[in-house]
Image (tube, helix red, strand yellow):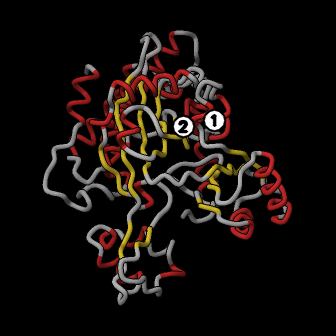
Amino acid sequence: MKLDAALRLAQPARSPEQPVSFFEFWPGWLFYTPVVAHCITLAMRYRSPLALAAANPRITAGGLCGESKLSILDQVDDTARPLLARYTSITTHAWSAHADLAAGEQALAEADLSFPVVAKPDVGCNGTGVRLIGSPADLYRYLAAFPRNERVLLQEYLPEDGEAGLFYVRHPNEPIGRITSITLKYAPTVTGDGRSSLRQLITADPRAGRIPQLYLPRLAQRLHEVPAQGERVRLVFVGNHCKGSIFRDGINHATPALTACFESVARAIPEFHFGRIDVRFASLAALSRGEGFRIIEINGAGSEATHVWDPQTRLIDAWRAQFFHYGQAYAIGAANRDRGIRPPRIREVLRLWRRQKRLMASYPLND
């Protein structure tokens, strides 16, 4: 399937606004069964079950799973480094949370970072374990709850309201790549009336009330509060759909200027061919011009074109977008294999996946 045709197929058919699509929070096995079946056919076509793990040769397993966020950010060269949110990292002490705090404060000082900062695991996905840290006391509590001898990223907090994920695809033989998906991410909020508790506001909200399990545990200590008339309460910090953020399809903002800008960003990452670059931005107009944004994360072969979680997206179009992007990942990985780059062994990828799964189960609750 040609790229332009696939992108047209992936566009959602707009219908009257609905807060949640009927498949948006299906169990993973139900939504992804056709996707897995498609990947099996791709594995047979390209004669390798893990060809896609060679899509980005300089990232562990191509970014399929278990990769280090820090190692990816560290690869960005000087041409794009000013676009990165500043960051540092520490490894938690074998037994002392007090030593963690001292190391964290020293790392922040050396990186010229101050509170608030964003803490996130070096290995993980779906926003698991990501928290906004406002003080040394917050940092101490976060690190005390973090698994021992594991790396934590401490990243500059960017106050801009806008957040987006831009998916980039470039085959090894192509001179330039393309933005194949843009997801605009919005934080859900409820507005106080001076009478209702936060719990009541959440359960009465057209969207949040249908997925309260994503918000109530995180806000357990505040559910009794009664927000003042007109007071807006943000329900989740992390920009991830499965944690409760609202996603919208923004592919119409993929202007030539934005595409040219992200071509230069992608080229600043050695051998980066396929993945999603997450950014925060001040305005959509500026973003469309390729301006006014900072990069918070770079994801590889395991990332999704997350515009499919726009509540207006049809199920068939969500599946088509998944099929298209996995097809691109396999084709790119196979092309890299033909250049002499060997995909990782199944045993190694399973080891990475099991470690990531184990770590994610032990991270602190995200904001």
Picture coordinates of residue 240 (x, y %)?
Answer: 45, 53
Q: Residue at x 40, y 76 (%)?
A: 231
Q: Is residue 97 left or right of residue 259?
A: right
Picture coordinates of residue 93 (x, y %)?
Answer: 83, 57
Residue linked to disc 2: 298
For the residue pair 126 and 327, the one nearer the viewer reads as 126
Q: Dot 1: what SS?
A: helix
Numbered circle sitting on residue 12: none
Numbered circle sitting on residue 73: 1
Q: Which image quadrant for residue 169?
A: top left
Q: Residue at x 62, y 29 (%)?
A: 76
Q: Amino acid at mark 1?
A: Leu
For the residue pair 282 and 311, the one nearer the viewer reads as 282
Q: Which image quadrant for residue 328?
A: top left
- Residue 40 in sight from this viewpoint: no
**Marks 2 and 1 close (CB-CB < 8 Å):** yes
Q: Residue at x 38, y 53 (%)?
A: 28
Residue furthest bottom as drawn = 195
Q: Is residue 174 left or right of residue 354?
A: left
Residue 240's place in the image compared with 308, above or below, is below
Residue 183's place in the image compared with 362, above or below, is above
Mark 2, other Cα within 10 Å: few <14 / some 14–19 / many ≥20: many
Residue 215's place in the image compared with 113, above or below, is below
Q: Dot 2: what SS?
A: strand
- Residue 199 in sight from this viewpoint: yes
Q: Residue at x 63, y 50 (%)?
A: 156
* Sequence-first disc among 2 and 1: 1
For the residue pair 44 and 269, the one nearer the viewer reads as 269
Q: Amino acid at mark 2?
A: Ile
Number of marks in picture: 2
